[in-house]
Image: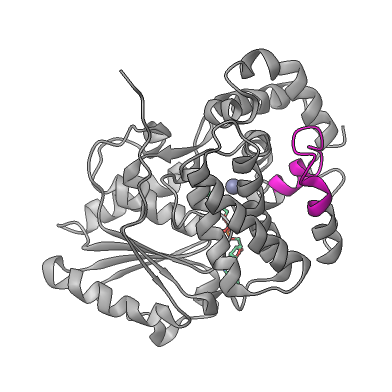
Amino acid sequence: MLSFKTFTPVPKVIFSRGAISFLAALLDEKRSEKGYVVFVIDHFFKANPLNDKVSICNTDLCLFLDTTDEPKTATIDLYADFIKKAYKKLPSAVVGIGGGSTLDTAKALAIMLTNPGQTHEYQGWDLVKIKPVYKIGVPTLSGTGSEVSRTTVLTGPEKKQGINSEYSLFDHVVLDPDLLATVPTQQRFYTGMDCYIHCVESLAGTFLNEFSGAFASKALELCEGIFLHKCDDADLMVASYMGGSAIVYSEVGVCHALSYGISYAFGVHHGLANCVVFNHLEEYYPQYLPYFKEMLIKNQVTLPERPVGIVNDTTLNKMIDITLLMEKPLHNALGPQWKSIFTRDIIGNLYKRILGL
Ligand code: NAD
Ligand code: ZN
């Protein structure tokens, strides 16, 4: 049988400055059918409220997500169990307002409200069987592409891996560049570089095709413009969307396969972990490293030389295991024979170099 891949985009997108004010109208359509809405909002907005920009009714549930650590499957289980016990019916929508951590939490929660079992059982490819609750994504930090991707990346008891499924896609996305105004400069850089690296890994991969290549080239050009010349939040939001679209129809590569191990073992955030890894990948992405290093200098970002503490053999082996789980990215980066090229020894030595061991 011929294998094929379908590009499933997010069905509805609103893009404009101030667009978050349209959220109330979008939800009103849904509320009339079923009732309450669950909001998952980055904790930054507890102290800096979005106020009247988001109309939250007193029957709604508002969960402020602590994003100090990246999202865990256990948190989703906690939220889903609470809602199932406290409410007699499902919400009419789940709305995620925040960066990649919050968007992924909202997506996973919408899935776990309708699917049985525990969240970690769905980490992998196409394991979700039941349609989730209607979900809306409102990014307040740009770069991960979570707003457009068919995955929700979570750390579980055994691994950091996404729930890769068409059911992970948002139903509606609201892109409002004004929401990026408060993002700290370093965070903007790290998450922005996540987008840059998505583009590089898509363009340099064996899965590259004209379709994903067009998204990746444009997003890469936008990122270089933003981080080498002039930061523009609207451009960054579009770049994130396009970089995310590129990897929907291609894949990430060696950098992501290695950075997942570091995030899993030491809790280093995705954007920073990617930068720390990418900085050492001359042999895999030689064309792009000079631009990356120039962007570091232009944006006055110094990466830590020893980003984590002591790494014993057990931890190193676990990190190698996590990397080897990233079969599709490694196939994309290194071709079908990747298993014989990217051995445990090579991965271990790369980790030692990256972590300054
Ligand atoms: P994040 O969501 O973890 O947020 C980082 C920090 O930025 C937090 O402290 C948060 O409070 C703050 N923040 C967010 N918006 C802000 C604003 N407007 N003003 C001030 N502060 C703000 O960071 P991220 O880099 O967007 O997301 C990382 C997560 O995304 C990781 O868990 C990663 O694995 C995941 N990810 C998912 C995908 C996907 O396709 N689903 C792709 C790449 C990465
Ligand atoms: Zn990424």
Is residue 53 among the parts visible in the rendering?
yes
Above or below residue 54? Residue 323 is above
Task: Residue lying at the far top in this picture: please name it.
Answer: 340
Q: Which of 83 and 105 lies nearest the eye of the viewer?
A: 105
In-front residue for pair 123/333: 333
Q: Quadrant of ligand 1?
A: bottom right
Asked whether, in this view, residue 15 is left or right of residue 338, the answer is left
Q: Residue at position x 68%, y 40% from top?
A: 266
| Viewport quadrant of the N terminus | top left
Q: In the figure, 242 relative to 175: above or below?
A: above
Q: Nearer the viewer, residue 266 or 327?
A: 327
- In the figure, residue 287 lies in which quadrant? top right
Quarter location, residue 257 = top right
Left or right: 223, with 157 as reference point: right
Extreme-bottom residue of the structure: 52
User: Is 313 rendered above or below residue 357?
Assistant: above
* Residue 135 percent across, percent down from the top left: 31, 59
What span is in magenta? 273-292
